[in-house]
Amino acid sequence: MAVIEVEDVRKRYGETVAVDGVSFTVEHGEIFGVLGRNGAGKTTTVEIIEGLRRPDSGSVRVLGLDPVRDRKALRNVLGVQLQEGTLPDKATVGELVRLYRSFYADGHDPHRLLADLGLDHKRDTFVDDLSGGQVQRLSIALALVGKPRVAVLDELTTGLDPRARRDTWELIEQVRSAGVTILLVTHFMDEAKHLCDRIAVFDGGRIATLDTPAGLVARTHGESDASLDEAFLAMTDDEEPRR
Amino acid sequence: MTDHTARVEIPRTGPGPRAWLALTAHEGRMVRRDTAGLLIPLGMPLLIMVMNGGGDSPAAPGLGGMTQQTAFLLPMAMVTVVAIVGVINMPSFLATYRRYKILRRLAVTPASPSMVLVAQVVVGLLQTLAGVVLVLVVAAMMFDVAPPAAPLALVAAFVATTAAMFAIGMLIAAVSPTPNAALAIGLVAFFAIMALGGGFGNTANLPDALATAGQYLPFGAGLESMLAAWLGEPMNAGQVGALGGVTVVAGLVSARLFRWE
């Protein structure tokens, strides 16, 4: 059963074409990677799936819902972690999780969720006083507290140390095994390779390649020891990646 | 209870009363933990009232021993409370929420960001009410205070003033690109309407055009309407109309211009 269906979506901002005919589907229980450089159209595509932006043309369905027309229904079953999503400094971890829990008819118990995310000892700590990894885990908690059936995670592990990244990956795999379909937006090849079942490589507003991690590597080099990094660079332009 | 593999009925309802309550309580905590924003609207009007309240001035007619000075200072302190909360504090909060994408984060939950606006207004009203009660209690302890001659008219004038101040605050929140801009615009607007409205003393020395404008801006219009109600005199219909006009125009324009991100 396809959970996310994107068909020939286009979006331009003035003269700039951000998304230029993107189509893909994400199956139930899949971790689907959206990979690409800055400006490749990843974020715009994801924002269209979330219903934050309206496509100029093309169609999007999430669990059969139109993200714009059925936004009310979709909000109840879609968990989102936004890139650079900031939380109020002067709220505590526990307060925020309880607040977000109140938005949903059904959801996780805030105590259990914080314990599962290793944040229970930080329940009374202000966001201001959390480490980068803890803020990231809190934002994942807020994305999951409404028991979403689809989770969109943007720049999941940006700014985390290697240990925290590994822990976060483990967590995402647990979430998936609970039946949640995950759309993962990332810059990191190792992350995509580790977590994703399939990866769409975005370039210039289009999907350059869509394959499994192993398939992506094989497709460019045919050598098993080629890194996904190299595959990625070969698939996108040969200019220097923008920072 | 939810089998993840089965097709599940998706609720189409928005957030219920529990979410509204939780969000309002959350905004209350945010305001409470912003120490300056909590104390200035409560303290500054009191300070102005107490520092100016000692002098001898003739008793106001028909109000027992209450002096004209006190009759002026009380509504003046009340208008100052609501002006600080509505014109300075609220837009600064909302601009900060926009800047740090807090509104955008809420837009992808069942709670819409407009709920934050409502919650901020509710909390601002509660803070205003607390400030007004504080003003009245301190005034009653320090001065001879007679109850207002027309209490209902006083309440109505204060409600109209509050609506106008909050509408201006929403307008500032709508047009400010950054939190700093919101604070700057809020402060300038506050001091301008306060100075022109007689908050820093007599406006007789101002150019006529400015003094007249000040009478119809929300500080002057609110202050004079409330003073009239306290003394039992008829309110100036033009000033009351100006309060309503500011509320409607600023409210509509801010609704049109408000940016969520």
Image (cartoon, rainbow, N blue to C red):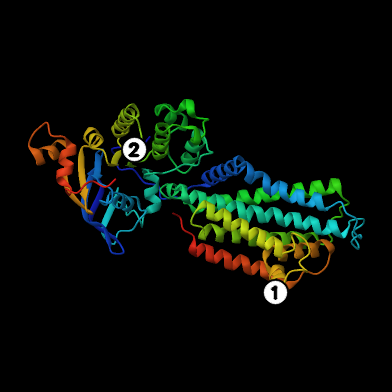
Chain identity of mark 2: A
Three-letter code for the amino acid on which mark 1 is drawn: Ala
Residue at image point 38% right, 34% down: B1
Q: Give the label on residue B209, or none.
A: 1
The residue identified by callout 2 is: A158
Residue closest to the eye, A74 or A202: A202
Q: Are marks 1 and 2 on the same chain?
A: no
Q: Quick check: marks 1 and 2 in contact, CB under 8 Å?
A: no
Q: Give the label on residue A10, or none.
A: none
Chain identity of mark 1: B
Residue B69 higher or lower than A82, as above or below: below
Residue at image point 70% right, 60% down: B194
Label 2: which secondary element: loop
Percent coordinates x, y for residue B35 in the rendering: 63, 41
Residue A18 higher or lower than A161, as above or below: below
Would residue B188 be found to the left or right of residue B100 on screen? right
Residue B23 higher or lower than B204, as above or below: above
- Dot 1 crowding, Cα within 10 Å, few <14, some 14–19, many 20+: few
Percent coordinates x, y for residue A231 in the rendering: 15, 40
Q: Quarter of the image containing the C terminus of chain A?
A: top left
Distance, label 1 to label 2, CA atoms, is 58 Å
Percent coordinates x, y for residue B221 in the rendering: 72, 66
Three-letter code for the amino acid on which mark 2 is drawn: Thr
